[in-house]
Image: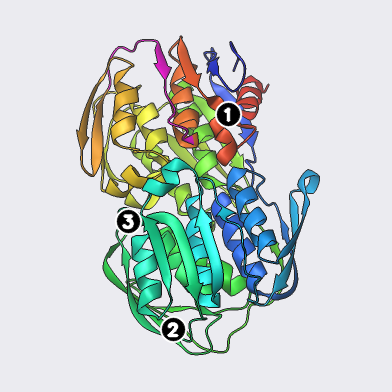
Amino acid sequence: MTESKPADDAITVETCSRPVNASIAPPGSKSITNRALVCAALADGTSVLTGALDSDDTRVMIDSLQKIGVKVETDLGQNKLTVHGTGGRFTDCDEDLFIGNSGTTVRFLTAMLGFAGGNFKLDGVGRMRERPIGPLVDALQGLGSKTNALSPGGCPPVEIRSPPISGGQVAVSGSISSQYLSGLLMAAAQAPGDVEFTIDGPLISKPYVHMTIEVMRSFGVACQADASLTHFSIDAQQKYAATEYSIEPDASAASYFWAAAAICGGTATVRGLSRDSLQGDVGFVDCLEKMGCTVDWGSDHISVTGPAKTGIDIDMSNVSDTVQTLTSVALFVDGPTNVRNVAHNRVKETDRIGNLAIELRKFGVQVDERRDGLTVHPGPLNPAVIETYDDHRMAMSLALVGLKQAGVVITNPGCVSKTYPDYFAELRDFLNAE
């Protein structure tokens, strides 16, 4: 990769002239890091998190935890966080907890502080005030909390002025984000009474709920769930236990390197992930396999050998954070690729259906947009200047198109700091590895 302008302005992607032949261990999972931070904060005693991600999303989580009385020591050189848990006893915060545009932070902390009770306000950037949190607030209110979303449409800022939640039963919507449920599950162990949740309607991104339950278990709290993930219960009197916890590499970040092999040919190996990963996004390689790539599942690695050959019709509801990555690959195969059942992508960091379609069309191809997905028709490509909408995944995914198509410019590449600050440098080194 080369930078034609200052890093915060734009970069021009350098084409890749040979097949990929490299391995990498991406930074730690953002999803697991922020879950582990919540569980560690709720524990009594000191937890050590290794392999933790250092990014905008984890930094706003740590900053907010520190403001409410949780001491977090950071050793960025070792990717280690030391968390001195408070057992769910938090200090009222007179200033806003600023959560940027981190969906996990605002949803997990709203649930945690709603259960704990106290006086708090959570706010973020302008886009955060457009991202719904109403279903989570409704669930907390159903359990007796005085928690409110202050922007139109049930969006942040979120204000909590409430006593602790004692327990109870409530329905939770899971059709917009599974993070509502994940936040509630982690928070419920604070209640002195049993807590039960029933899913109202469909539940998207189920692998992330499994991840939440497994992280909770590692910190000593059991969640009972039925096989269909429609009913959950947290028995009273459970306590999180301080522990040493290892965080695996980020599977969503890994998707970009697997996609590089699908586009350029060759083999991309991601170390530290396997079929036993907590992250559902390792399933992205199944999409690439359907497109004609070969996948090797090792005990501590996953390798993809490309190139991809054919378009596919695919339900990506369980791997929705990799939709942008897959559509970049779809530009280089034979036949259209149809992505379905990801309507919730419209309320992420940007509208990851509508705005994605706009940017893909800049390459000169036909893109059919629907409410719940889109169809990409490959064809001859043009150079393009890509807007990123301050969305890290738009920048990282669409930069991959420039590996084969010259003249691809990515604006505001610094937005990748949300989850992967060194992405462009590490992608360059990966592609140039001997």
Amino acid type indicated by mark 1:
Gly
Residue 323 image point, x, y percent: 37, 39
Q: Quadrant of the C terminus?
A: top right
Side of 373 relative to 114 (left or right): left
Residue 71 vs residue 321: left or right?
right
| Residue 118 point in image, percent of width and height | 56, 74
Q: Which of pointers 3 and 2 lies earlier in the amino acid sequence? A: 3
Of callouts 2 and 1, the N-terminal one: 2
Q: Dot 2: what SS?
A: strand
Q: Quadrant of residue 181?
A: bottom left
Residue found at x 44% / y 36% = 294
Residue tagged by mark 3?
A: 176
Compared with residue 217, is residue 397 higher up or lower down, i.e. above or below? above
Residue at point 34%, 64% (across, down) = 135
Snapshot quadrant of residue 309 = top left
Distance from Cα at disc 3 to Cα at disc 2: 22 Å
Magenta part of the chain: 378-391
Q: Is residue 401 above or below residue 99?
A: above
* Numbered disc 3: secondary structure: loop
Examine the rendering and report whether any part of residue 368 can be seen: yes
Q: Which numbered dot is residue 414? A: 1
Name the one closer to the observer, 339 or 356. Answer: 356
In this rendering, the answer to whether 93 lies above or below 345 is below
Distance between the Cα atoms at labels 2 and 1?
42 Å
In which quadrant is the N terminus drawn?
A: top right
Q: Nearer the viewer, residue 156 or 247?
A: 156
Q: Is 106 or 267 nearer to us in this picture? A: 106
Q: Are marks 3 and 2 in contact (CB under 8 Å)?
A: no
Q: Which residue is mark 2?
A: 195
